[in-house]
Image (spheres, grey):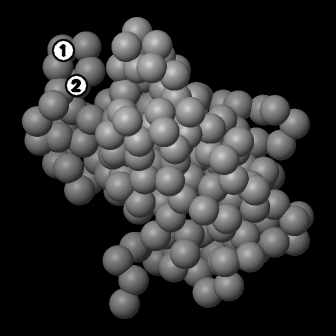
């Protein structure tokens, strides 16, 4: 039994099929989702010929070492920021054989929020073919850690679908 709702499984399946048909490979760079995007994509049998790799970069050091996020970016904007999400997605492309990479970094709670960066704030970026890079901010509120992470996975999937031409 899958830990993901059937609607996400079916969307992931369609994404994998579309990417396979187009010869596109995917990568993920995850912080607050802790590998859930990679888990969703690899829930699909045969996804290994499309999902190239996933980076779980929970710490700032991991973001820097594995993805090349600049220390200056982290110092100036913090881990939960559009700038960091953009560098994470671009770094996932540079450090993989994928043509599309999605990144996610946010505050899932229950602690760690502030007035400027409340619980439920999540930044996403998707780097795709032809140098296209799209960033998005979502504020999910505080429905709980699991709900924030689940919403973040669904949003990341939506960005991957758009980059792969599934929308």
Q: Is residue 89 visible?
A: no
Residue drawn at (26%, 53%), measured in percent from left and top? 147
Q: Nearer the viewer, residue 120 or 101?
A: 101
Residue drawn at (15%, 31%), measured in percent from left and top? 112
Residue drawn at (35%, 55%), measured in percent from left and top? 34
Above or below residue 37? Residue 87 is: above
Q: Could you tell me residue 54's position as x and y percent?
A: 54, 59
* Relative horizontal placement of residue 149, taking residue 138 as reference (left or right): left
Q: Is residue 13 visible?
A: yes
- Number of the label disc, if any, that sits on residue 35: none
- Residue pushed farthest bottom? 1
Q: Could you tell me residue 61's position as x and y percent?
A: 37, 36
Q: Which residue is mark 2?
A: 118
Check disc 2: other Cα within 10 Å, few if <14, some if 14-19, many if 20+: some
* Relative horizontal placement of residue 97, taking residue 12 as reference (left or right): right
Above or below residue 102? Residue 5 is: below
Q: Which residue is mark 1?
A: 115
Count all numbered tags in the image, as a single digit: 2
* Relative horizontal placement of residue 25, taking residue 7 as reference (left or right): right
Label pair 2/1, CB-CB below 8 angstroms = yes
Residue drawn at (87%, 36%), measured in percent from left and top? 130
Spatial CA span between label 2 and label 1: 6 Å
Q: Nearer the viewer, residue 40 or 8?
A: 40
Q: Nearer the viewer, residue 64 or 76?
A: 64
Q: Quadrant of residue 14?
A: bottom right
Q: Could you tell me residue 155's position as x and y percent?
A: 50, 47
- Residue pushed farthest left? 111
Check disc 1: other Cα within 10 Å, few if <14, some if 14-19, many if 20+: few
Q: Could you tell me residue 76's position as x and y percent?
A: 40, 9
């Amino acid at each position: 039994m899958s830990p993901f709702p059937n609607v996400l499984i079916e969307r992931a399946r369609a994404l994998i099929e579309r990417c396979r048909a187009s010869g596109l490979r995917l990568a993920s760079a995850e912080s607050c989702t802790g590998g859930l995007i990679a888990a969703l994509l690899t829930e699909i049998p045969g996804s290994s010929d499309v999902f190239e790799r996933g980076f779980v970069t929970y710490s700032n050091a991991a973001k820097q070492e594995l993805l090349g996020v600049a220390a200056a970016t982290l110092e100036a904007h913090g881990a939960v920021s559009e700038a960091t999400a953009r560098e994470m997605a671009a770094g996932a492309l540079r450090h993989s054989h994928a043509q599309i990479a999605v990144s996610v970094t946010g505050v899932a709670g229950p602690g760690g929020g502030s007035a400027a960066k409340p619980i439920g704030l999540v930044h996403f970026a998707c780097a795709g073919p032809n140098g296209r890079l799209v960033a998005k901010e979502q504020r999910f509120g505080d429905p709980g850690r699991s709900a924030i992470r689940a919403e973040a996975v669904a949003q990341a999937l939506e960005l991957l679908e758009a980059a792969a031409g599934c929308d």
